[in-house]
Image (tube, rainbow, N blue to C red):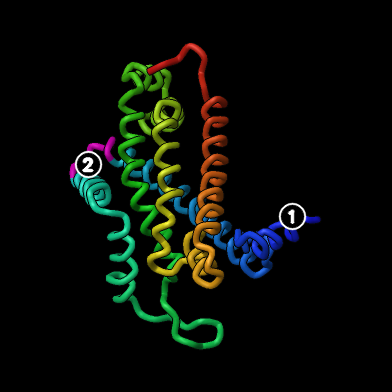
Amino acid sequence: MGIEEFFRMLADTHGINVSVIYDDYDRTRFLHGFWTTTWLSLVAGGLSVVIGLAGAAALATPSRPLRWIVRCYVELFRNTPPLVQLLFFYFAIGGMLPMARDARGDAAPLISNTGWAIVSFSLFAGAFNVEIFRSGLEAVPRATGEAAEALGYTRLQALRYVGLPLALRVCLPALGNNLVNLVKTTSLAYAIAVPELLYAAAQIWSESMNVRETMNVLLLAYIVLIAVLVWALERWERALRLPGWSP
């Protein structure tokens, strides 16, 4: 007896209906949701790291207006709920944009719901990453940058080749925590009908009437996804460790 037949038998005889295993249609929808959540996490996570680096570099510049803009951005996105931010981008900003035309010539939003989810989550996590990278840069001894400049590096080169690599080692645990939190935050995309894990699971249990079983599978899927991310971050942290160096 194969695994699909076993779970079909459980559904028929004991009412344990794990349809995402034995039903092709439900399994396809769930796997598509898993891939959407993974892709959303990767893209938003990568963009948030870029935003964090750019923001931390801007805070290190002598330009007061630039530092003020970054500070306002950080305070705005750190002190408002991510769901409110997502709905604001999707309905308030998205509603003001002109409509585009799809391949069939029909009217379509200029930015899709998935696109707005990426924008919102990237900016939300990026605000925390700005502070994470800023604290990492401040943890690097000032004498390290001065030594690099004494060797002929410009201030920008000292930051790029000396300051940032050392700061990354300091802030990597906090950065990892923020990326893990971002993966969990992607479930909020359910509110604007992005077909991620929670959205797919809700469709399945509303049709198959198996809320308990699908919720267990959903929980397991998030545990697996986050466990892989944590494992990769731990490997990365060990690879970057410098024996004998601490801030």
> What are the residue bounds of the magenta stretch?
59-64
Secondary structure that dominates the magenta span? loop
In which quadrant is the C terminus drawn? top left
Q: Position of residue 31 (x, y in %)?
A: 61, 60
**Residue 31 in sight in this render:** no
Q: Which residue is mark 1?
A: 3
Q: Position of residue 10 (x, y in %)?
A: 67, 59
Residue 57, x across and y down, in percent: 33, 39
Q: Nearer the viewer, mark 2 or mark 1?
A: 1
Label 1 is placed on what type of residue?
Ile
Residue for point 47% across, 60% down = 198
Query: Which residue is at the front of the view, 107 or 177?
Result: 177
Q: Which mark is residue 100?
A: none
Asked if the magenta segment contains residue 61, the reply would be yes
Residue 214 painted magenta: no
Give the vertical position of 39 relative to 200 (above or below). Answer: above
Dot 2 or dot 1, earlier in sequence = 1
Quadrant in which the N terminus appears = bottom right
- Residue pictured at 55% horizontal, 46% vertical: 225
Outermost residue on the right side: it is 1
* Local secondary structure at mark 2: loop
Q: Residue at x 22, y 44 (%)?
A: 71
In the rendered view, tell whether residue 193 sits above or below residue 134: below
Question: Is residue 17 shown left or right of residue 83?
Answer: right
The residue tagged 2 is 63
